[in-house]
Image (tube, helix red, strand yellow):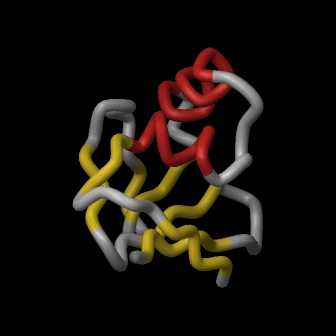
Amino acid sequence: MKKIKIETEGITLNQFLKWASIVGSGAEAKELIQAGEVLVNGVVENRRGRKLKINDIIELRGSNEKYQVSR
């Protein structure tokens, strides 16, 4: 699992996908989220504005990579 450090208390899912270099653009992040390809703590999340907190775990459907929001 990759730990991705953020400098704020929280970050939106859309911003996190870009910050962690999981996607190259906001449009790409929006597409993945709307297609139901992004899981937050094991549950499909379709809100790109979803606020992530420290220790949340993000993964893409069909990928073994997991990313943890950390400080």
Residue furthest bottom as drawn:
1
Residue 59: percent from left, percent from top: 59, 62
Which percent across, then down, holds residue 30?
Answer: 53, 23
Check the image and report above or below for 54 versus 58. below
Residue at the location (35% across, 79% down)? 55
Side (left or right) of 42 relative to 24? left
The residue positioned 57% from the left and 69% from the top of the image is 4
Most extreme residue toward the front is 7
25 with respect to 68 (left or right): right
Vertical placement of 40 versus 31: above or below? below
Residue at the far top: name it.
27
Residue 42 figure quarter: bottom left
Image quadrant where one finds the N terminus: bottom right
Q: Residue at x 76, y 63 (%)?
A: 63
Of residue 66 and residue 54, the one placed in the foreground of this image is 54
- Which x, y percent locates residue 46? 38, 35
Quadrant for the C terminus in the image: bottom left
Name the residue located 44 percent from the left edge and 69 percent from the top edge.
Answer: 69
